[in-house]
Image (tube, rainbow, N blue to C red):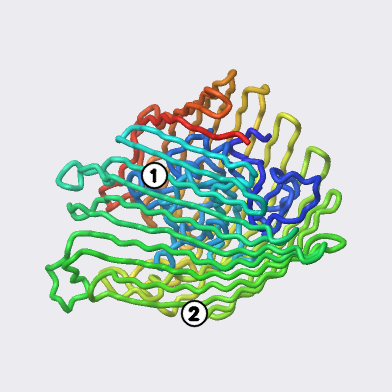
């Protein structure tokens, strides 16, 4: 089981919320995202996948989205090669229906409502937890589809440990990374730096003019942490993450490019005040700052809102975040009381005549209860959000799990969630075909799901069925409005089979129907079926793997007039241990050189996807 790439049944060792739990519980068996408290993986009611650092290196994916597309319930869409905008659809929900956290902080754009996944380097990630299903009763607005929580690299070893890697690949791709983590007495620290430079390929599938050139991408990222133990059970910590990306993109036959900064930093105080009361206080900031350089517009009069002689637009989001979480251990179960405050400030300049600066604050109050007793697992949460823009909103959720036998376990849950309108949807000044609407109501959802899982020593399998009703769907237009309702129903299948100690076969398949209730059409860019099959084999110091990933037909438009054919990709990975600390890595993507489409730039021009490509690297991980 612990070798599974897809199910990822490994723990979360370094999350700040992991605190004084019984010594018999190994950190590698603990996850946090499903309940906001440490919980044994085998007792979790929610639908969770965990990916650790070992799996990230073994998969050898080129980007964060490449890693996510292999996971259950995840579909992606891209707008070109490396660094171009990407979207994640979790269980058929919209790309704005996911709360994405980096070390516990939101870094999404409050204007667009999406997260720049393409700007989050895998080299900075220690592990990822994916919670599928509604989670607003735990995390507040936007968690209709679920939560993706990213933890940057760190080690709590007393000895200074160095990690480093270099790599070369197709499209003139070059990577490098270096990190050091260690400790001095009561102080733990770490710094990791990485870079990526690639020529990539043309974002649009066009063979004329400047839009036919390669659209390159460069990224420089840093993460760091320091944690000081003041006394037993009491620590202060600092964290920092930054990613700077520069990428070219296509549009209007012009040499377009953008510069984007993702940044987060925070102070955390963890305090075990009594044997039964643990407090975690976090104060931080998340930033998304995007500058786009497009073709200047001088055809309009200076008084026209479309007039932009420089072609430069800017979208900046700052999110101040405060969280105070109190976990109280009861004779039976754990009670969590939480207060958090989110202050969102946006400063957008789409052009000289199109500017807006807005802010809104949200105060959230949450109570949750988790119980694991003999064969029973139970969790319930209730949250109320007070928002200066859309008023008050209450969400709740409950789940129950029962272990029928040592091999069989069933779970059932119900949850409500909501999504707040983005600042663009509310306030964007009128332009051709689009304008904001300050009277928009939040989107609302009700989700029901059941699962059954079977596990023995060498084999595990599970099915999770879900039924999600979403009301007041926001659709773009002039103006943006609440019109549509959607129903998303389906099931996710997962299996892992250790055929031998050295041979693992795993896979997942999602079968779903994400449809607009009014038209019965498939939601944009989402298909009925998608999944992955993975085979891994270890032979001495050599480990190799093959994976098949694919999806059925999707449509680029709401009326289902622009189809995107189904596809199947075959990839291979390999790594060879030169010594306990050194290894060679290789990954070959799209071996069959499939020509497939994930999205369109216009009704007739699709965005490009990568053909056959190869990446090789050398990695060093110092042992304790």
Element marked by disc 2: loop
Residue 490: x %, y % from top left: 58, 49
Residue 239: x %, y % from top left: 54, 58
Residue 131: x %, y % from top left: 61, 53
Q: Is residue 285 above or below residue 2?
A: below
In-front residue for pair 541/538: 541
Is the N terminus in the top left, top right, bottom left or bottom right quadrant? top right
Residue displayed at 36% across by 31% down: 613
- How many neighbours does mark 1 have within 10 angstroms: few (below 14), some (14-19), or many (20 or more)? many
Residue displayed at 37% across by 63% down: 289
Q: CA distance from mark 1 to mark 2?
A: 39 Å
Q: Which mark is residue 195?
A: 1
Q: Is residue 294 above or below residue 419?
A: above
Q: Circle 2 sits on which residue?
A: 389
Residue displayed at 54% across by 43% down: 71
Viewer-side label of 1, 2: 1
Residue contact at pointers 1 and 2, CB within 8 angstroms: no
Instruction: Locate residue 262 relative to residue 79 in the image: left or right.
Output: right
């Amino acid at each position: 089981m612990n070798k599974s790439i897809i199910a990822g049944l490994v723990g979360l060792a370094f999350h700040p919320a992991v605190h004084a739990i019984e010594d018999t519980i190994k950190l590698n068996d603990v996850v946090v995202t499903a309940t906001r408290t440490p919980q044994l993986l085998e007792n979790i009611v929610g639908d969770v996948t965990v990916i650790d650092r070992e799996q990230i290196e073994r998969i050898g994916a080129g980007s964060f989205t490449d890693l996510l597309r292999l996971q259950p319930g995840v579909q992606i869409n891209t707008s070109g090669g490396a660094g171009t905008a990407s979207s994640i659809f979790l269980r058929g929900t919209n790309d704005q229906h996911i709360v994405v956290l980096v070390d516990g902080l939101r870094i999404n754009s409050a204007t667009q409502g999406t997260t720049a996944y393409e700007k989050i380097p895998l080299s900075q990630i220690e592990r990822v937890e994916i919670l599928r299903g509604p989670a607003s009763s735990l995390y507040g607005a936007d968690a209709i589809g679920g939560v993706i929580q990213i933890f940057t690299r760190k080690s709590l070893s007393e000895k200074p440990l160095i990690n480093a890697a270099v790599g070369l690949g197709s499209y003139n791709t070059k990577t490098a990374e270096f990190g050091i983590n260690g400790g001095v007495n009561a102080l733990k620290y770490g710094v990791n730096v990485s870079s990526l430079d690639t020529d990539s390929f043309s974002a649009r599938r066009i063979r004329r003019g400047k839009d036919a050139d390669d659209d390159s991408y460069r990224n420089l990222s840093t993460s760091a942490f320091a944690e000081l133990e003041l006394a037993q059970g009491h620590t202060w910590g600092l964290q920092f993450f930054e990613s700077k990306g520069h990428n070219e993109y296509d549009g209007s036959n012009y040499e377009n490019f953008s510069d984007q900064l993702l940044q987060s930093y925070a102070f955390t105080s963890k305090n075990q005040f009594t044997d039964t009361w643990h407090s975690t206080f976090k104060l931080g900031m998340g930033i998304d700052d995007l500058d786009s350089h497009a073709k200047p517009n001088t055809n309009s009069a200076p008084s026209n809102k479309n007039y932009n002689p420089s072609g430069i637009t800017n979208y900046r989001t700052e999110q101040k975040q405060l969280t105070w979480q109190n976990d109280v251990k009861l004779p039976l179960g754990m009670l969590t009381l939480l207060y958090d405050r989110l202050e969102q400030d946006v400063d957008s300049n789409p052009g000289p005549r199109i500017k807006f600066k807005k802010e809104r604050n949200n105060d959230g109050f949450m109570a949750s209860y988790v119980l694991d007793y003999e064969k029973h697992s139970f969790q319930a949460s209730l949250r109320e959000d007070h928002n200066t823009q859309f008023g008050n909103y209450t969400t709740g959720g409950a789940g129950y799990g029962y272990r029928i036998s040592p091999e069989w376990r069933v779970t059932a849950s119900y949850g409500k969630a909501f999504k707040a309108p983005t600042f663009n949807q509310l306030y964007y000044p009128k332009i051709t075909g689009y304008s904001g609407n300050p009277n928009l109501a939040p989107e609302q959802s009700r989700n029901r799901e059941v699962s059954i899982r079977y596990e023995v020593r060498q084999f595990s399998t599970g099915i999770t069925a879900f039924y999600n009703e979403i009301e007041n769907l926001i659709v773009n237009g002039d103006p943006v409005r609440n019109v549509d309702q959607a129903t998303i129903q389906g099931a996710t299948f997962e299996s892992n089979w250790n055929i031998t100690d050295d041979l693992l076969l795993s896979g997942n398949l999602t079968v779903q129907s994400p449809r607009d209730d009014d038209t019965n059409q498939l939601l944009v860019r989402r298909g009925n079926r998608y999944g992955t099959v993975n085979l891994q084999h270890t032979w001495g110091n050599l480990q190799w793997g093959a994976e098949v990933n694919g999806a059925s037909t999707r449509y680029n438009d709401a009326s289902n007039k622009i189809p995107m054919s189904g596809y199947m990709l075959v990839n291979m990975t390999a790594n060879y241990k030169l010594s306990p600390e050194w290894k060679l890595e290789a990954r070959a993507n799209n071996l069959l050189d499939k020509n497939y489409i994930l999205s369109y730039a216009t009704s007739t021009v699709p965005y490009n996807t990568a053909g056959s490509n190869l990446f090789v690297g050398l990695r060093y991980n110092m042992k304790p």
